[in-house]
Image: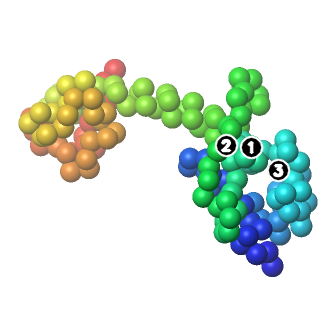
Amino acid sequence: MVRPEDMWQCQTVNCGYIYNPDKGDRKGKIPKGTLFQDIPDDWRCPICGGTKKCFRPLMGEGSTKADCELPVETDPEKLTVAVSAAKMTDQKESDSMKKYVCEICGYVYDPAEGDSDGDIPAGTSFDDLPDYWTCPVCGASKDNFVLED
C-alpha cells in the first residue's frame, strides 16, 4: 500500500487528480508501481493536461506550493477535456448574459439592468440569480422563464 507522501495531487483549479503509484496512469501509459518522480517529464495530467509542475505531494514538504503550466494547444484534435470544457464554459458565460422572458406575463429579465426592486445589481446573469428570485411583475419562479429569441 502506498504512503500519502508518494501520492501526488494536481493543483490546477477544478482538477485535483491524484496520481497513485499503486494504480499508475493507463491513459498516460504509466504502469502500476511507477513513482511520481520516475514519470517522464513530458507526462500530462490525464484530467486537465497540466504538467508535472502542477502536482504536489499529498503530505510532507512542498505539498502546498502551486506553480504549474497548463498546455497551450490550438488543434481541436489535441485539446484536452479540460480545455474543451473551458471553451464551453466561456460560451456558457456569454450565453448567461442573454435576456430571459417570463412565460406568464412577458416580463424580460435583462442582466445589463438587473432587478433594482429585488436588490439584484446590474450585470447579474440569469443563472446567477438566487433560487428564491421571482418575476417582479407576476411573482413567477425562475422555472417560468425562457431564453429570449
Q: Are marks 1 and 3 in contact (CB under 8 Å)?
A: no
The disc at residue 27 is 3
> Which residue position holds label 1?
51
Q: Secondary structure at mark 1?
A: loop
Residue 22 percent across, percent down from the top left: 83, 69
* Camera-side mark, 3 or 2: 2
Residue on which disc 2 sits: 68
| Residue closest to the far bottom | 1
Position above or below: 21 against 26: below
Which of the two labelled residues, at mark 2 and mark 1, occupies the earlier sequence position? 1
Q: Tell which of 1 and 63 is nearer to you.
A: 63
Task: Give the residue displayed 82% in from the left and 65% down from the top.
Answer: 21
Who is closer to the viewer here, 97 or 135? 97
Query: Could you give the CA–CA distance between mark 2 and mark 1, rounded to whole angstroms?
Result: 7 Å
Three-letter code, disc 2: Cys
Q: Quadrant of residue 8?
A: bottom right
Task: Residue 61 in the image: state x and y as whole percent.
Answer: 68, 64
Q: Secondary structure at mark 3?
A: loop
* Quarter assignment of residue 18: bottom right
Q: Is residue 47 visible?
A: no
Q: Residue furthest top?
A: 149
Residue 27 placement (x, y as % from top left): 82, 50
Q: Marks 1 and 3, Cα distance to the nearest angstrom?
A: 15 Å
